[in-house]
Image (cartoon, rainbow, N blue to C red):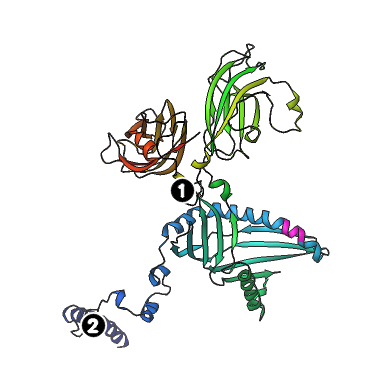
Amino acid sequence: MGFVSTILGFCGFGVGVSCGLTIGYYLFIYFQPCDVKDPVIRPLVERDSKSLQQLLSEIPLWVKCPDYDRVDWLNKFLEYMWPYLDKAICRTAKDIAAPIIAEQIPKYKIDSVEFETLTLGSLPPTFQGMKVYVTEEKELIMEPSIKWAGNPNVTVAVKAFGLKATVQVVDLQVFAAPRITLKPLVPSFPCFANIFVSLMEKPHVDFGLKLLGADLMSIPGLYRFVQETIKDQVANMYLWPKTLEVQILDPSKAMKKPVGVLHVKILRAMNLKKKDLLGASDPYVKLKLTESKLPSKKTPVRHKNLNPEWNEEFNMVVKDPESQALELSVYDWEQIGKHDKMGMNVIPLKDLTPDESKTMTLNLLKNMDANDAQNDKDRGQIMVELTYKPFKEDELPKDFEDNDAAHKVPEGTPPGGGVLIIIVHEAQDVEGKHHTNPYVKILFKGEERKTKQVKKNRDPRWGEEFNFVLEEPPVNDRLHMEVVSTSTRIGLLHPKETLGYVDINLSDVVSNKRINEKYHLIDSKNGRLQVELQWQTAS
């Protein structure tokens, strides 16, 4: 009887569960609640600040403050560059800290302080936003908001009285709002002379400090004391209007414009030494002005000649005759491999009398180190003729800060020579059939100059300046400028192609002294090239 009851119980349970699931499924499918309403969707602009704070845990500055711009590209840049920046920053920190530590530890009778490990971790700082100010001065002001919750590993070992203690900094957090000012802005790369850094508010600094495995910051009162001390010390040094100044360029040199022309005539060389296996040399001369970014000039090669004559003339732009010097180097030309240096010498421009020709015979030296014994070895001589011609006093700009004054010249076409200044600013809508890696090639009076190549860019910017020293105004000359693209891949298929060109008549430059225009490129669909031309007269 009990067995029958058990069987019937199991059957009843199975039938009941099956019926319940069937009835529940039917009710779920065919009966829906009628009191359910669609959700009300409201745009964020209709929310108040309190509601937004509840919806979003942390609102970016570029949302709360319209004058802050997004800088996602900068955060992406830091993400990719952080492994390399980490090593560079740590190396620089060690170099800066080493002499400071060496100077301070004797005062406290400490044997040594060394970094056992120094890494900033894998988490880079992030920029929450950037505010940029435009002023009437020649400066650029930026105020980024920086937050860094990093995982650095900084371990310092301190040895004193025969004992060693290890201190480790972990879980570093830094929130700061610096002001970065680039000034003055100058027409020489990187286009600013100084960096000024100051803090607009006290920074937030939080970190853990482990000693012998224990966290010192857990000691009551110590955490707040250390944190406030760091904030006060940093604020005393860099809180605005106090600043940290980093000089990038000498403003007095960066803002200088040409003040004269150096005429160089390479006459000859005498008693040069044999460099080739067959008992001769193939000499040529390279000449360059120090503190000049222009490429070196070269004489032709005189093959198999130890007493070559060139009689080649060159004109070079001078910006500071008191500090610049003419560097002459004689090389032995090689068809294959590196050219051998046969000797060199340097002529300071301050040794020249303006408007007076001077012929000089110089001994060739290995280098300009007066203590090098190898300079006593005979390497031959070189003879040159130099003439420094300064510009007229009334043609020099009185104040470089005034852009208009920098281009003031006497009215009318000058009777003498001068400097043609070509500034290649940018191009727009240039595109090749096979590749677009543009650079500008300048052809003028048989001389060729080139800008740097910009890879994979239809709107490249160069901002490069080229100077041509001329004996007379180029009233009847034309300037040929060509935008060229070269392939970055190895191969001979489509290695180079022209993206467009323009020929500029220079008579307008001579009469107007300065023009800055965008030229439509010939053989280009929509390409344009912005070029600034200046003509400065010489005596």
Amino acid type at circle 2 is Gly
Which dot, 2 or 1, sits closer to the camera? 1
Rendered location of residue 434, percent (x, y)? 32, 35
Report the magenta stretch's main SS: helix
Question: In whole angstroms, how far apart are the C-alphas of marks 2 and 1?
Answer: 96 Å
**What residue appears at the point 74 percent right and 27 percent down from the top-left corner?**
374
**What residue appears at the point 48 percent right and 64 percent down from the top-left corner?**
144
Rendered location of residue 145, percent (x, y)? 48, 66
Rendered location of residue 273, percent (x, y)? 67, 17
Q: Residues within 10 Å of mark 2 (few under 14, many from 20)?
A: few
Residue 430 versus residue 239 in the image, above or below: above
Is 102 a magenta residue? yes
Residue 122, disc: none
Residue 20, disc: 2
Q: In the rendered view, does 342 fall on the left or right side of 525?
A: right
Of the image marks 2 and 1, the number of the one nearer the N terminus: 2
Q: In the rendered view, does 129 fall on the left or right side of 232?
A: left
Q: Secondary structure at mark 2?
A: helix
Q: Which residues are magenta?
A: 99-103
Amino acid type at circle 1 is Ala
